[in-house]
Amino acid sequence: HKGMVYFAWLLIFIGVGGLIWYTLFTRTYQTTNDAQVDQYITPVSSRVPGFVQEVRYTEDQRVKKGDTLIVIDTEEYTNYLDVANADLETQKFSAVVSEMAAETQSNQIAVINEKLENAKVEVWKTEREYKRFENLLKEKSATEQQFEQVKAAYEMALTNQKAIEKQVSVTVASTKEAQSRVTPSKSIIQSQKARKNNANLFLKYTVVVAPYDGVVGARYIQPGQYIKEGQTLVNVVSEEKWITANFRETQVGLLEVGAEVYFTVDAYPNQKFNAKIISFSPASGSKFSLLPQNNATGNFIKIEQRIPTKIVLEPKQDVSKLLAGMNVLVHAKTAQ
């Protein structure tokens, strides 16, 4: 009987001790098992369609930012670039011709204006001669024949001036027309440059690279396969890792940013990791769901909400075994 009594007292002491430890622990730490390891998972998509020429990665391979993952056949896009280059050079030549034509017409205006000035001087001279002989004829000091010759020279000078003035008008109009072709030619050059840049971009897009350091996922693409624009080719998982813990709303009030955290992973329950709280979500998890709950209904049942909390790991820890989606048991130190 004494042995049974001692055993009963032992159970009582253990129970009381456990209760005291649990009470002190829960006052010191807030615990949740609604937590997982998180990483960025980025689907890498094709920006151009085409046939796959090379696949340069294997499943679960570690890659660096900028590493080539997939090469799409470049022949078609190289041809596009060659055509764009040829069109650009042709348009540049056309623009030079337009500028030269405008410059030539402008020079012609200067030459014709000079001829017009000479013609005006000739008119002025012949007009004076004409008036002088007209007076001489009235005074019987010149013959009719001399007067007719002078008059003919004056009329010829006038006709020549009018012809040159008309030529000036035609040349000015031609010059304006030639100059009007220069600006569109330059605009077309800019358009052709844009086409060339696009062709360069499309050629560049035939090489699909890793967006950041990480690990590639399953391989679904094979050489010779036709892929479409926007098609997901591979998923890259980032090296950056953190914990998303969904604390109850009654627990969040006892926590603060910067609080110390330790956690274990279900896969490795005997290994402890140290971390700290970096931020709290601006809304509960239910508010981010596809169909948020609407409490403005006749039948209301209060449901305790959970607040996603981001927890970052302390440096100098081996986190290589932590994988996205692993379940975690988190203990966060309560604010004092």
Image (cartoon, rainbow, N blue to C red):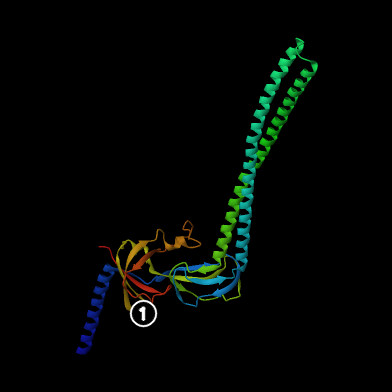
> Which one is in front, 302 or 232?
232
In the rendered image, the quadrant that contains the C terminus is bottom left
Query: Which residue does the image show at 70% across and 20% down from the upper left?
Result: 127
Residue 302: % across, % down: 42, 62
Query: Which residue does the image show at 55% across and 69% down from the upper left?
Result: 232
Query: Which residue does the image show at 78% across and 15% down from the upper left?
Result: 143
Residue 119: % across, % down: 68, 28
Left or right: 96, with 21 as reference point: right
Which corner quadrant of the image does residue 131 belong to?
A: top right
In the rendered image, the quadrant that contains the N terminus is bottom left
Left or right: 143, with 9 as reference point: right
Count the numbered circles shown: 1
What's the amino acid at mark 1?
Tyr
> Which one is in front, 286 or 43?
43
Query: Which residue does the image show at 77% across and 21% down from the upper left?
Result: 149
Residue 47 drawn above or below residue 263: above
Furthest-top residue in view?
139
Q: Tell me, yes or no, if residue 195 can be seen here.
A: yes
Which corner quadrant of the image does residue 77 belong to?
A: bottom right
Residue 175: % across, % down: 65, 39
Name the residue carrying label 1. Answer: 268
Assess disc 1: are there few (<14), some (14-19) or many (≥20) residues with their C-alpha within 10 Å of its C-alpha. Answer: few
> Which one is in front, 56 or 219?
56
Furthest-left residue in view?
2
Mark 1, secondary structure of its residue: strand
Q: Tell me, yes or no, if residue 1 can be seen here.
A: no
